[in-house]
Image (cartoon, grey):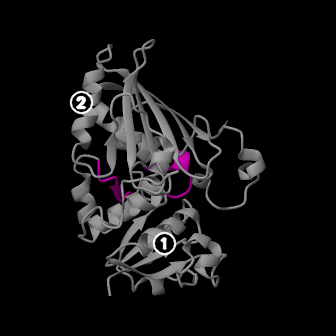
Amino acid sequence: MGIRVAVVGASGYAGGELLRLIAGHPELDLVAATAHSQAGAPVAEVHPHLAGLDLVFVATDPADLAAADLVFLALPHGESAALAAALPADVKVVDLGADHRLADAAAWSRYYGGQHAGAWTYGLPELPGQRDRVAAADRVAATGCYAVATTLALAPLIAAGVVAPDDVVVVAASGTSGAGRSAKTHLLASEVMGSLSPYKVGAHQHVPEIKQATGATSLSFTPVLAPMPRGILATVTARPAGGTADPAAARDALTVAYADEPFVRLLPAGTWPATAATLGSNACHLQVGTDVDSGRVIVTSAVDNLGKGAAGQAVQCANLMLGLPETTGLTALGIAP
């Protein structure tokens, strides 16, 4: 038997992607997939793409989860903390929700509300020093989907002093799966297809997470709902730190930061990221340029919001926590067409 893992909230989109990745993982054995309203239903009935996975959703019971070596929590924001606290200390946990991402209790209160549950190790291995911290942790807070796309584009530029941290603007488009699986009128096909629409303008909950991870001190973030099931394309612009953009310095900062990273690709000059190229993968594609009019540095980032933005990132962290090669069960290659 391999390493025993369980998925809580497995009936959602991120939970379903976790089940798919675990099914193809050579070292992980799925011992439980829990759900709330779908408890008792066969997994393949809820996730038809997982036909052949002979498993039934069960109700969430901390006592049952205690038999796992590691538990993935794929629950709505605000629902992970209480369950995690009920698990034995020797059970490792990766939380895909926001409950333990923020170190600042005031930021949690402002953007999420309710009681702050405290911060866990932040689950983005590509940040300096973070890989070792994740590997040593028993509790890891995986990144938000917009946050990983933006952070990977921005953090090396701020760290290298290429861009100013106090003037960052992000516009990012996400597929509808980022809003979860619950039935909502504004996510109906008739409402979404053929239309782009912004939401949570000026007040998105990933803002404090991005600032915490990148060192940005002022961030204007506009999320956009895109008529596609999955994927994120983030365009990050920032004022050059020295007043004049240095395209070579910006590219060099990203090249150095990700030279040995298995999942981050800085594309050849002139090739810009596309969400389709990252689908089904744990990859992040980046490109950097300079606005010829404003002189601002521009970085475009593409990820699969259910891959590197959620389930893939969680498995990447779990691999490190379990002492496995970081890339086990994951790919940086997308699917096409």
Residue 192 horizontal side relative to residue 312, left or right: right
Point 77% across, 52% down: residue? 185
Point 44% across, 75% down: residue? 23
Sort mark 2 into few (<14), some (14-19) or many (20+) by Cα contacts within 10 Å. some
> Would you say residue 215 is visible in this rendering?
no
Point 22% across, 43% down: residue? 259
Q: Quadrant of residue 289?
A: top left
Comparing 200 with 182, the one in front is 182
Q: Tell me the distance, in whole angstroms, between the alpha carbons under discs 1 and 2.
A: 38 Å
Comparing 66 with 299, the one in front is 299
Q: Is residue 167 above or below residue 132?
A: above
Q: Earlier in the sequence, mark 1 or mark 2?
A: 1
> Would you say residue 66 is visible in this rendering?
yes
Point 50% across, 65% down: residue? 17
Q: How many marks?
A: 2
Q: Is residue 272 magenta?
A: no
Circle 2 sits on which residue? Answer: 252
Q: Quadrant of residue 4?
A: bottom left
SS under mark 1: helix
Circle 1 sits on which residue? Answer: 19
SS under mark 2: helix
Q: Position of residue 200 (x, y in %)?
A: 62, 40
Q: Position of residue 280 (x, y in %)?
A: 47, 57
Point out which mark residue 93 bears: none
Comparing 226 with 180, the one in front is 226
Q: Is residue 221 above or below residue 327?
A: above
**Farthest residue, direction front:** 337
Magenta stretch, residue numbers: 105-126
Comparing 232 with 218, the one in front is 232
Look at the numbered discs 1 and 2 and tell me whether their residues touch, using CB distance below 8 Å.
no
Q: Is residue 120 magenta?
A: yes
